[in-house]
Image (cartoon, rainbow, N blue to C red):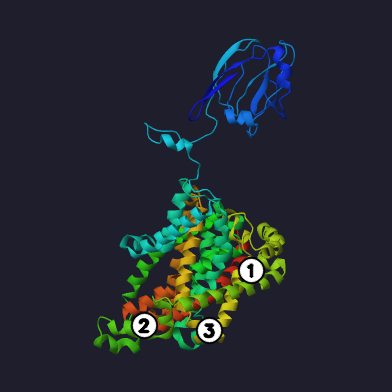
Amino acid sequence: WDHTPRAVETARFQMFVPPASLTSRLNAVPRRVGRTSKNGHATTIGAQRFVTTKVGARPRCVSVSRAACLSGTHGNTRGISVTNTPTQPVSVPSTLGNTAKAAPRVAPGRRVTQINRQTTHRPRAFLGVGEGLSTLAWPLVQPNHHWAVWAAILCASTFGLWGNKQRWGARVGGASLLSTLFALVLANTGVIPNHAPAYDVVIAFLLPLAVPLLLLTADLRRVITCTGRVLWCFLVGALGTTIGSVLAYTICPMASLGADNAWKMGAALMARHIGGAVNYVAVAGGLNIPGDLVAAGLAADNLMNAVYFAVLFAVARTASPPDADADYDQLDPNHVAARDEAKSDVILTARLSNSFDVLKGSCALSLAAVVCAVSGVIAASLPASWSSFGAATSTAAALAGTTAVAAKTAVVATGLAGGIANVVSPLMIPIATIVTIACATAFPKRVGGLAPSGEALAAIVMQCFFVVIGASGSIKMMWTTAPCLFLYSFVQVMFHLLFTVVVGEKVFGLRRADLLIASNSNVGGPTTAAAMAASKGWRSLVVPAMLTGVLGYAVATFAGLSFGAAVLSKLPVT
């Protein structure tokens, strides 16, 4: 037969139905048996794909390149040997799919001309635009192209940090949400993959490193001795978040998330509104929440925070300044001295400093790696049942049976869609939190001095993680699940604020300024709480705000895991 390939998608060729005199030569070509087709039985002659077709039937065809035919290496080829009599079934090219056009009827000894169809599904051109898209591999960045995947991760994380410096970026929701949404769009438009080995590296190695780097100032002795009444306000706020979680779980429609995922997301958001984003990630990893839900919850929570801060600063206008700061307000109405004094504090200097020391950064990274190594050994030695955190669910039971293997193998290439715990041990991040707090409390000056450089590295690591969260997510899933998660966060946080102010003032007799700063430490974290105290001129509350925020980082993960497994998992899903 005469075979002339076309340049792009199809090939036009002419084929003679071989007479009986040539069948002996054709039978000598190596062949392999293939699958049964509708019109007959398929095997392989060389590298061409053929199927037996009864005389007079309408055969279908597809072509392969001449080089593949000659080399016999075409991967999708099948054919059949031709028998010695022209009345037996003959060999004609067959299709690789079900959408080929019908070919003319074939009789033995006749010569037919056939035109092949497109064999792969690729984007088609529209009005002459996109002719070259059919020749591209999708996604554009393939999962096994590791350098390209890492370049996409770092560029998306940089975009979030840059956007946070812009006025529009700060209004959208900050660096974490910008990076997540940017990666979500890239993944859902076919630019970057949804799953890649590089994503597993971020989750298995970089994410655990971020936890010790963010807790280098978690000196519990100073938290207890230097926070004063703000510590009690913080505890009232944490209680308000806990009760608000139960209220939100009972009235918000969470059934669309699934019975297991509903209480897990409630526990993760509870930890988020007692500590911060790192606690949200830690609980999501410990409870093995799917990546789609993690991304949707992060987006919903960031939008909720914008509403919360607007209400918080509106209520703060009615708060009287602390007695220790009343005289300073007359001498310093613009609060310049308060901000300068805040910057001179040791812990504030450690957390708010923009300087990066290479040696201290290297020491912080080394300490974090040692903490993760010790935590990994401890997690692997603990009973596998501990990873369920006491939750009596089918998912927790299945996870408990596989935790010991996951902890020993360190990395399982399953991607984030199945949950963070498929890549890293569920117990590793909580244990790393305990070990880091012990180090920061035992050696406050040495460990705390590493915080400026360490937290700069942690910011980059967390941005990479948020990119991975967005890349593994689905816009459709986020569109369907984010509204109920936003409603859950709204009920939870608004009840927290109302409970903190009303119960704190009426029942415990605490000052409103202290309560609002403690609420900011719960929901916003140490940096936003200290910034609020400095901007309001409440200089006596700057250090307690920072310390209670660090305390939230230290305890929120355990509060979310324990309360979620003990209470939320037992409640019915609405």
- Which residue is labeled 2 in the image? 343
- Which residue is labeled 3 in the image? 220
> How many numbered circles does the render carry?
3
Q: Nearer the viewer, mark 2 or mark 3?
A: 2
Task: Specify the quadrant that holds the N terminus.
Answer: top right
The reply to whether callout 2 and callout 3 are in contact (CB within 8 Å) is: no
Secondary structure under badge 1?
A: loop
The foreground one among 561 and 127 is 127
Q: Earlier in the sequence, mark 1 or mark 2?
A: 2
- Which residue is labeled 1 in the image? 427
Q: Residues within 10 Å of mark 2 (few under 14, many from 20)?
A: some
Q: Is residue 402 above or below residue 51?
A: below
Q: Earlier in the sequence, mark 3 or mark 1?
A: 3
Q: Residue at x 34, y 72 (%)?
A: 315
The foreground one among 223 and 104 is 104
Question: Please, what is the three-letter code of the amino acid marked with disc 2?
Answer: Lys
Task: Specify the quadrant that holds the C terminus.
Answer: bottom right
Q: Percent x, y for residue 508? A: 46, 82
Q: Percent x, y for residue 386? A: 69, 68
Secondary structure under badge 3?
A: helix
The picture quadrant where one finds residue 353 is: bottom left
Question: Please, what is the three-letter code of the amino acid marked with disc 3?
Answer: Leu
Q: Is residue 246 visible?
A: no
Q: Percent x, y for residue 405? A: 71, 62
Question: Please, what is the three-letter code of the amino acid marked with disc 1?
Answer: Leu
| Cα distance between the residues tagged 3 and 1 | 22 Å
Q: Is residue 151 above or below residue 57?
A: below
